[in-house]
Image: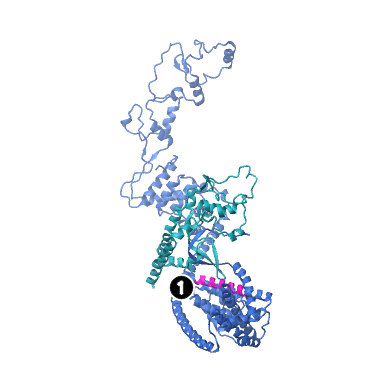
């Protein structure tokens, strides 16, 4: 998870954007564009970390095509089927496309007694396989104990924790890796955008 | 364990979002535990039920109030009065305290009034009045404020229904300002509070307290557990509300007052405050408290002054904005009134049209009357009136409402001239079958000649003639252009048909075989032996009057059938069929009376001329002189058309 503490909190962000639109629609557009451009280098960098294939001893860890569950072993087993057929399918272009800049996320953090904190600008790794690749093996043993395994592979959890890092390297492999490299720069850039494009304008108006 | 779905994301900017009421309730459960803990710290014990009730009620009231306030803010925002929302909430708060009506009721009422009046000032005025009326007459505030807001836009029905001294006849046609003045005279002055009012006021004060706790204290606790950010006053208020939540009845003001005092002076509570302050790192002794009290008083005074300045600024701005809104409102009301008048006029017109139509229609069985026949007949005055009215009825279908009313009115009063002009006559012509081409009728109608219909078509013709008389040289039907048909023995270029030429007579003469036809081409030379007679010949001469020479001969036919040999083939026998006998020609002669020669095309036959004669004639109207008015030209054309119609030929309107 991203370092939430490092995220810039703008309590009334929606109101701010709405007011910007009222003052001048172009101002809002410029502001949004500035924010997106600030995060873009990190997005590009994260995309370069997406490997063409993930192999172990010349065998693909992820399937190349979604499973059809027609093999005799799977045909009667509906319990262990994945809810998302693309979850264990590695298609690099789709994974790269799934790394995008979004103005909201589904993550919510309680804030105060009647509010929640949600992202107003975030870089997300939105594909299921991308998320697995990003974080497989990252959990601590305490968190893994809470996770219920639904796999037919009784060693699945160990595979995640021990085997996958051997194949793909240490966890936090895509956007978090990019964040570790470029995060501070991006945050500075965002602060600059807010400062330069917004506060200056407001000061100018006043 | 079901885990919330998370997304792999790096957040750069975070915003805050409101949670729903459910979240609030969920949090309030958490608050109960904290409060119980805190109660223990205070050395008090509260029952879980009472605490639950308290927290729930506080949270609910706060949430409800906040919801109402937001609605009001949004309403004000829409009118561009967002800056005045704090003024509005201050007003409702003070009104709630002074009137004893809870803010929960006042804010929606104010919102509704703002919606109607478009101004905060007027809305506040009306709300104050509403509270006074509701108090004195024992009515619901919502009912009264709704009635006043309706009355503001001119709908006094609800106000009359309130039964506060207004009758329908009294308010009818009155301006709202007059009614408002009347209401203010009656309800404007405040009456002394009754005991019930006082109790209500107290209840409002408690409610406010509870809301304050719901807002500030619960928030504080939720945020940081045993928070001591809140002021001592809030904590005292909390203690008081705890008392209320525990079910300690608040029936008398004295008791409440005593309770407040005792709680405020309670050494245990004061000690706890000291303890809490020390927890925060504030050295808070008795002397410190006195110094702080002075500082607090100064800060309070400064804050009050700042607020006063702010309020004044807002009031000035409010006056400006409301002046603009009042203008808009006035313009809108004027527009609505205009539209209303327009609608009323339209309705009246439609009703008049319907009435006229009905008054005429019931006299007729329209299907039973043949308009065409009626127009052409000589009619009595009564029938003529009826025909006119029926025609007008038909015409009105093609007209706009206003025109139709005029036409039908004129028809009912027997004013022919007004009822119909030529345009309508053209419609009649169409109805009567004189012209079938709509485009031509429309083209003529578009010119709108100012010729009135008086009696019948003959009269129209007369009028048309009079109008054009002396202005133009018009020969109607005089120049009939047909391709030149040469006279017998003449040539095509020799000139046109003589004035005495009669196409009907010519045709008749041409087809009549019973007479000696002087105008025939030279008969073809017949090469045959003298002893052979051709059909219709006896002894080589034409057999005049022997029309039954080919009558069937049953005996001969039978003979032929039986012997396979025809007597008719005997060329030497008189009446026998010659070898060159043409059965088809013979049948044609039998059936039509035409000879085979008559069926043949003469050498001088001109197909174009024949077609022109067969299909109609082209009528050219030559106009000499300057055309000064289109109407006259149209009149001339119309005259020509009528004349052609009368000649018996069908009318063809060409492009």
Above or below for B295 versus A16: below
Q: Which residue is mark 1?
A: B325
Query: Which chain appears blue?
Result: B
Depth check, front residue: B414 or B616? B616
Q: Where residue A27 sits in the image (x, y, percent)? A: 40, 64
Relative horizontal placement of residue B481, taking residue A107 as reference (left or right): left
Which of the 4 image quadrants contains residue B487?
Answer: top left
Along the line of sight, which residue is nearer the eye, B580 or A77?
Answer: A77
Vertical placement of residue B488 versus B252, above or below: above
Find residue B54 and report its horizontal and vertical position in percent: 64, 76
- Using residue B477 as the reference point, say whether residue B76 is left or right of it: right
Of B330 and B346, nearer the camera is B330
- On whether residue B69 falls in the magenta region, the answer is yes
Please state, as top left, top right, bottom left or bottom right, where the N terminus of chain B lies in the image: bottom right
Q: Quadrant of the C terminus of chain B?
A: top left
**In which chain is the residue bearing label 1?**
B
Q: Which residues are magenta?
A: B57-76
Residue A117 x/y as whole percent: 52, 66
Answer with the quarter of the image where residue B602 lies.
top left
> For the stretch drawn in magenta, what is the main secondary structure?
helix
Q: Colour of chain A?
A: cyan
């Amino acid at each position: 998870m991203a370092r939430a503490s490092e995220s810039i909190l703008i309590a009334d962000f929606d109101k701010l954007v709405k007011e910007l639109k009222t003052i001048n629609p172009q101002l809002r557009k410029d502001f949004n564009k500035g924010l997106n451009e600030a995060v873009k280098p990190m997005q590009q960098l994260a995309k370069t970390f997406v490997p063409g294939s993930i192999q172990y001893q010349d065998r693909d860890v992820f399937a190349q095509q979604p499973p059809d569950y027609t093999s005799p072993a799977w045909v009667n087993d509906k319990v262990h089927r994945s809810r998302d057929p693309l979850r264990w399918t590695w298609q690099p272009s789709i994974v790269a496309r799934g790394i995008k800049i979004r103005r909201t996320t589904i993550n919510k953090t309680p804030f105060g007694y009647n509010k929640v904190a949600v992202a107003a600008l975030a870089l997300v790794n939105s594909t299921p396989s991308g998320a697995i690749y990003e974080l497989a093996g990252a959990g601590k043993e305490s968190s893994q104990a809470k996770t219920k395994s639904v796999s037919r592979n009784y060693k699945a959890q160990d595979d995640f924790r021990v085997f996958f890092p051997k194949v793909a390297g240490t966890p936090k492999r895509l956007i978090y890796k990019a964040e570790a490299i470029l995060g501070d720069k991006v945050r500075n850039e965002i602060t600059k955008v807010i400062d330069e494009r917004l506060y200056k304008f407001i000061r100018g108006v006043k | 364990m079901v885990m919330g779905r998370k997304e792999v994301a790096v957040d750069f900017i975070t915003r805050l979002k409101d949670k729903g009421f459910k979240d609030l309730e969920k949090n309030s459960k958490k608050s109960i535990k904290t409060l119980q803990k805190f109660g223990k710290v205070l050395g008090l014990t509260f029952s879980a039920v009472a605490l639950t009730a308290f927290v729930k009620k506080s949270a609910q009231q706060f949430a409800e109030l906040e919801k109402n306030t937001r609605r009001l803010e949004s309403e004000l925002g829409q009118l561009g009065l967002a800056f005045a929302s704090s003024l509005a909430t201050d007003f409702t708060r003070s009104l709630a305290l002074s009137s004893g009506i809870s803010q929960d009721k006042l804010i929606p009422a104010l919102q509704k009034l703002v919606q109607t009046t478009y101004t905060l000032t007027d809305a506040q005025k009306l709300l104050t009045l509403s509270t006074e009326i509701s108090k004195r007459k024992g009515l619901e505030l919502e009912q009264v404020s709704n009635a006043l807001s309706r009355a503001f836009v001119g709908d006094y029905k609800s106000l009359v229904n309130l039964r506060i001294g207004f009758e329908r006849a009294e308010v009818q046609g009155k301006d709202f300002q007059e009614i408002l003045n009347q209401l203010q005279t009656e309800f404007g002055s405040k009456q002394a509070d009754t005991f019930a009012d006082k109790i209500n006021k107290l209840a409002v004060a408690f409610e406010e307290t509870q809301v304050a706790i719901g807002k500030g204290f619960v928030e504080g606790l939720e945020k940081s557990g045993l928070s001591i950010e809140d002021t001592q006053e809030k904590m005292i208020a909390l203690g008081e509300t705890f008392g209320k939540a525990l079910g300690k009845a608040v029936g008398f003001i004295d008791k409440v007052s005593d309770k407040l005092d005792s709680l405020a002076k309670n050494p245990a509570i004061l000690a706890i405050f000291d303890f809490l302050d020390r927890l925060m790192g504030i050295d808070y002794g008795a002397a410190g408290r006195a110094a702080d009290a002075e500082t607090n008083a100064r800060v309070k005074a400064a804050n009050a002054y700042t607020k006063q300045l702010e309020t004044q600024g807002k009031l000035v701005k409010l006056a400006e904005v409301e002046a603009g809104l009042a203008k808009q409102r006035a313009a809108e009301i004027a527009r609505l009134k205009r539209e209303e008048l327009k609608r009323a006029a339209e309705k009246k017109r439609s009703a008049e049209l319907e009435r006229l139509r009905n008054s005429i229609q019931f006299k007729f069985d329209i299907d039973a009357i043949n308009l065409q026949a009626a127009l052409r007949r000589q009619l009595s005055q009564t029938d003529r009136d009826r025909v006119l009215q029926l025609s007008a009825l038909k015409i009105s279908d093609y007209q706009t409402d206003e025109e139709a009313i005029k036409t039908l009115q004129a028809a009912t009063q027997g004013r022919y001239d007004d009822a119909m002009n030529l345009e309508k006559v053209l419609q009649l012509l169409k109805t009567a079958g004189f012209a079938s081409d709509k485009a031509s009728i429309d083209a003529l109608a578009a010119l709108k000649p100012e010729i009135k219909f008086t009696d019948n078509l003959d009269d129209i013709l007369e009028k048309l003639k009079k109008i054009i008389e002396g202005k133009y040289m018009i020969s109607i039907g005089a120049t009939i252009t047909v391709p030149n048909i040469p006279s017998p023995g003449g040539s095509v270029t020799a000139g046109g048909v003589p004035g005495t030429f009669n196409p009907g007579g010519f045709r008749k003469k041409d087809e009549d075989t019973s007479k000696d036809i002087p105008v025939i081409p030279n008969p073809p030379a017949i090469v045959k032996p003298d002893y052979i007679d051709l059909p219709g010949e006896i002894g080589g001469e034409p057999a005049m009057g022997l029309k039954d020479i080919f009558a069937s001969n049953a005996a001969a036919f039978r003979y032929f059938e039986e012997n396979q040999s025809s007597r008719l083939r005997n060329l030497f026998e008189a009446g026998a069929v010659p070898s060159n006998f043409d059965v088809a020609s013979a049948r044609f002669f039998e059936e039509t009376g035409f000879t085979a020669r008559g069926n043949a095309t003469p050498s001088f036959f001109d197909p174009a001329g024949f077609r022109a004669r067969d299909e109609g004639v082209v009528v050219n109207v030559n106009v000499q002189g300057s055309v000064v008015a289109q109407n006259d030209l149209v009149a001339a054309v119309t005259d020509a058309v009528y004349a052609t119609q009368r000649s018996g030929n069908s009318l063809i309107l060409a492009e």
